[in-house]
């Protein structure tokens, strides 16, 4: 991302080099705007999530769609956090500030949509934990070159996160032999 020059960006947009500076002072300003727009593009998905009748339904919808093969395989239209999050640490100035601002606004919107806890501080904390788990799992699933192994990883993480955020019980075949309380 940082290596792409202004000339290349403008050529792909079908515009001239000079037109760039009529709108942006430098490339980092463009990146900041692009990050804000990408986070804003997630709003329709958040509206769908928000319509779930319970916190468990809302969390399940997010978990299943985020950790689905379709999202994993469509890298160009997927989550901005997975796509550029690792690159942000190398940027400074407006680009990084814009990303951080967009990310914080995204977490706030996600917290409003999911409503995992009536306590606003706890809700934001749980949403941040869930989002971190989702991002990490998708990043790893995309990095695995064996589709079957990647699918298994996505399935395992969906099950784990459903247990954690949707209170779905462990299937009887997955119960730990050391979980003596489940025996009663």
Image (cartoon, grey):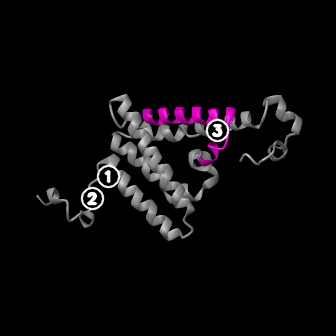
Query: Is 3 positioned to the left or the right of 172 in the image?
Result: right
Whichever of labels 3 and 1 marks the residue nearer the N terminus, that label is 3
Other-residue count near label 1 (Cα within 10 Å), few / some / many at <14 / 14–19 / ≥20:
some
Q: Which SS class for mark 2?
A: loop
Look at the numbered discs 1 and 2 and tell me whether their residues touch, using CB distance below 8 Å.
Answer: yes
Query: Is 75 positioned to the left or the right of 50 in the image?
Result: right
Q: Is residue 176 above or below residue 59?
A: below
* Extent of the magenta region: 86-112
**Relative image position of residue 133 (x, y in whole percent):** 44, 49
Disc 3 to disc 2, how far (Cα)? 38 Å
Disc 1 to disc 2, how far (Cα)? 7 Å
Q: Please name the predominant secondary structure of the magenta segment in the image.
A: helix
Mark number displayed over residue 35: 3
Disc 3 to disc 1, how far (Cα)? 32 Å
Mark number displayed over residue 3: none
Residue under the image location 57 percent in, 49 percent down: 82
Q: Which residue is mark 2?
A: 170
Whichever of labels 3 and 2 marks the residue nearer the N terminus, that label is 3
Q: Which SS class for mark 1?
A: helix
Q: Which residue is mark 1?
A: 163
| Numbered disc total | 3
């Amino acid at each position: 991302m940082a290596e792409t020059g202004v000339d290349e960006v403008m050529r792909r947009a079908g515009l001239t080099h000079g037109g760039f500076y009529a709108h942006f002072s430098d490339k980092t300003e463009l990146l900041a705007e692009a990050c804000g727009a990408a986070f804003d593009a997630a709003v329709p998905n958040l509206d769908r999530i928000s319509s779930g009748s319970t916190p468990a339904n809302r969390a399940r919808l997010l978990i299943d769609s985020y950790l689905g093969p379709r999202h994993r395989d469509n890298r160009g239209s997927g989550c901005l956090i997975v796509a550029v999050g690792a690159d942000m640490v190398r940027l400074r100035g407006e680009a990084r500030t814009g990303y951080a601002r967009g990310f914080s606004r995204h977490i706030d919107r996600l917290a409003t949509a999911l409503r995992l806890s009536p306590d606003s501080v706890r809700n934001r904390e749980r949403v941040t934990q869930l989002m971190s788990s989702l991002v990490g799992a998708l990043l790893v699933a995309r990095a695995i070159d064996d589709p079957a192994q990647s699918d298994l990883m996505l399935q395992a993480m969906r099950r784990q996160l459903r247990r954690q955020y949707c209170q779905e019980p462990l299937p009887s075949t997955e119960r730990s032999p050391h979980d003596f309380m489940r025996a009663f």
